[in-house]
Image (tube, coloured by chain):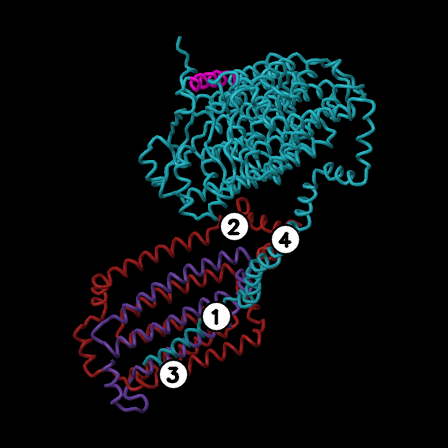
Chain colours: A cyan, B red, C purple
Amino acid sequence: MHLWFMDINTVWMVPLYPLLAFLAIVILRGFTDVRARVRLGHPPTEPVGNKMFFMALTVGATFLGLLHAVGTVSWLLGQEAGHVQAIERNWTWLQAGDFKFSLGYLVDAMSVMMLFVVTFISLLIQIYTHGYMEKDAGYAKFYSYLALFNFSMLGLVLSTNLFQTYIFWELVGVSSYLLIGFWFHKPSAAAACIKAFLMNRVGDFGFLIGILGFLYFSWGSWQNYLSVHPEQAVLSFQALGVLAPQVLGAAGAGLFSWICVLLFMGPMAKSAQVPLHTWLPDAMEGPTPISALIHAATMVAAGVYLVGRLYPVFTPSEAALPVVAIIGCMTALIGATIALTQTDIKKALAYSTMSQLGYMMAAMGVGAFAAALFHLFTHAFFKAMLFLCSGSVIHACEDEQDMRRMGGLRAKLPLTAYTYLAGTLAIAGFPLTSGFFSKDMILDGAFHYGAPVIYWVLTATAALTAFYMMRTYLLTFEGKYRGEAHVHHEHPWMVLPLVILAVPSLGVGYLLSGFFSEKLAFAHYIHFDFVPPGATAVHHPESLMALLTSPTTLISTAMVFAGLLLSWFFYGTEAGRQVPEKIRTAPVLSSFNSLFAHKWYFDEIYTFFVDKIYLVFAKGSAGFDRQAIDGLVNFSGQSVMGSGQALKQLQSGRVQTYIAVMFFGAVVLALFMIYCLY
Amino acid sequence: MIDLIIFWVFASIAIIAAVGVVTNKSIIKAALMLLAVFLSQAAFFVLNNADFLAIAQILVYAVGLTIVLLFAIMFTGDKTQLEAKPVSRGAKIMTTLIVLYTAFLLLSALAYPFRSVVLPPDSFQVISLLNEGSTRMLGQLLFSRYGLPFELASILLTAAMIGAIVLSKKSFTDEENDSVKYRLDLSSHPTEEAEGAYRTSLTVPRPLDRELEGSAK
Amino acid sequence: MYPLLNQMQQSSPLAIGDGVTLAHFLVLATVIFCIGLYGVLTGRNVIRVLICVELMMNAVNINLVAFNRFVEPTKLEGQIFAIFVLVVSAAEAAVGLAIVIALYRLRSSVNINDYNELKG
């Protein structure tokens, strides 16, 4: 039987499903909306049937997308590994002279991976959402936003060129904004969504300038290139590798590096890299399913994905990838250290996300291209699962998010606890979980990079990750219950996605590591042959045993165990319970503690900058505008008014005065004509 | 010689009557003085062989215009006391200066080229060739060379006639359907506080407003 | 430029010659014109002002006709011009008096100083 979704040429339908679902909900919601019902005189209760209908629309759209994703995966597996022939198709959207602006879809190994991740995790989270948002008045609106986000994200993933990417890049930003501010009646949520939007504007501004700069220096080259490859679009990703050296030649090394850094600003903001990261923890004001979907698994990872797409541009530049590596490294370390001190379970997970994104960026920077995307892939599963677990906990504890008022929840929420533990082990890099393989690939790449400091920072971050993740688990699920709220049982709709996600969280790493089957090796499909200057080529171990006994693995595993055990000692045993308190008050360590607890003072620095410097400038310019510019405008008006006031005295309203003046003029004219002209 | 006598007689009548027009306190008497000026004017036209113009002057000015003037005076009443009010000193001085200046200008302009122009010796022959006066020739000119201005003048007269009728129509200020009064009433309220450049004369009370207020009481 | 004027200068420079000359009419017209102008500038009654305007127009007409006779007696352009002045002044008088009547209904005054709508 021929199924339409198995055909690779129907991929363009994928973003359209959620778009149609979004439009359908927006239109139909008017008929079932609570307010609309009140307006029409019906009781303001939303029948379950309607709710299920909206969920079915969104979930159905995503499910169709997942089918397509499965189709593309099977297409990918049918290709010869290492020689995937990408498929690109474009439709002209607008044309101005020679310039043609195209929309289309690009199917290659990277987009197949992202397509699968996005549709799979979206589907599970949309199912989970029903349990989480069941009692919420904005249920249908929430699903419409989810569908909008899905549309934007899938369009982003399938983009063929940088312009299309930019469009969908902004669209996911808008969806993110809408969803963070979903409970906009909370002032903190309203502030958080604005913060996220503004922070992303900073990055997107640089991103757009970078795109235009690249286009400017490559304009002539595109004509030649597109005449050879007419099926591709201007700024097509497939052509970046061919044209980047020409742009480097045209712009010069220094300017080219600036273009690269500007391009990197987009991913920097979207993936919460230092120093544009401060929006991500605040984004946790959104409903937890959103935190799982957008701010952990998919959208924030889009930055890493885009860096992967831009890799052919970054590699010719000398400065671009080191910048990526340094920023990623700093983000990994800063995120992990802040996560140590967090008491809010979602904030802790948010900083963990930031740290892991830094990991991926650092991997990109050190040339471990496949490792970065592999970590993106595995991280999406276990981080989504962890957030969903936290959502389950928060839901059960009646919206309590503080871990100090939790504890011992394993008894009431057994499935949540076990899946959380699985996620913890996976993110910590416990051997043979999915996180282990991806993290090890990154560390392997960093080890072979020229600068050892990056390797050691990342290794230390691995230990910190193990420590703080175990801490959150222990504080939440072990020990005695410390809160007052009545703990509910797990919601069946919410447990199901957790259990499903636990499987890839634990197993997908081994499955795709290449040790399970050569055919399924992730790096065979997604790779980029590039060795940074000063680095040595990474030698992939042949067998699982060789991997487990390689020096980097031994070091990182030892670190992970150390982190896990220390955490268990501090938070799981009676003997170590007092140690954290002692650390907090110890002379040197306390200053570190306050540094971490204040999130490295980033918000304070920004506040200072905005309050004390920016606002002073702004007030100065406002004053200039009001005094000088407005003064000029007012002066011109007032001078006209004043001269009118003065001149109106001539306008006496007496006809005879006018006649006299007129006659006097006529006489002067006559005299002039008589004595001067003749 | 006879023409000199005629000229001086009528010139003295015209000047005395003109002074009377300006100075007589009664407006009706001023209008009648104007009639005298018009009639002596007709005599000057005859002196200048302009017989058609002389008749037209009597018909249009002396009869038509004077009657219209008298009607207008009848409508507005003889406000003799109006002229009793003294003219302001500045206006008087300025006016006198301008008039003197103009007189000086005109006389000096005249003195030079025109002072000795006399009737060309053959001009009476020309006129006698015409024999029946200038009327026929004027008519021929008006309907040939000056045809277009003539038609334009007729349009002007029609427009003036219609305009005069519209302007002086009674319903224009009809009490029941009084657009002017309505406009005044409306404008007096919102603009009362207007100041500076926005102040319009409509905000200043006028005789009619006062009258309306008085009649309301 | 003016051959006629040159010819005139050859004549006796002194006063008015035999009979009525052009200068008689011009001086007379000037006097009437100035009287009319004075009336226009000083009159308080708006009807008197209109009357004085008519006076000025008449002075102009005297000029036109006199010039016609003394300068170009075989042509009648001056009289044609005078006819048009007559027409225009008749129209002006008709409309002007209608306006005066309308204004009088509005203001119940013929004092020209009451008509100061244009006062700035």
> Where A456 falls versus C97 (above or below)?
above
**Percent coordinates x, y for residue A161 in the rendering:** 43, 33
Whether labels 1 and 4 belong to a single chain: the reply is: no
How many angstroms separate mark 4 from mark 3 (CA)?
Answer: 76 Å
A662 and A621: which one is in front? Answer: A621
Query: Is-magenta flag for residue B89?
Result: no
Tell me: A646 left or right of A495. left
Q: Chain of mark 2?
A: B
The residue that label 2 is drawn on is B173
Q: Badge 1, how many Cα within 10 Å: few under 14, some, many 20+?
A: few
B200 and B19: which one is in front? Answer: B200
Q: How many marks?
A: 4
Examine the image and state in which quarter residue A39 appears. Answer: top right
The residue that label 1 is drawn on is B29
Tell me: A391 left or right of A64. right
* Badge 3 element: helix
Q: Amino acid at mark 2?
A: Thr
Whether labels 2 and 3 belong to a single chain: the reply is: yes
The residue that label 3 is drawn on is B107
**Percent coordinates x, y for residue A450 in the rendering:** 55, 39
Direction left: furthest residue = B129
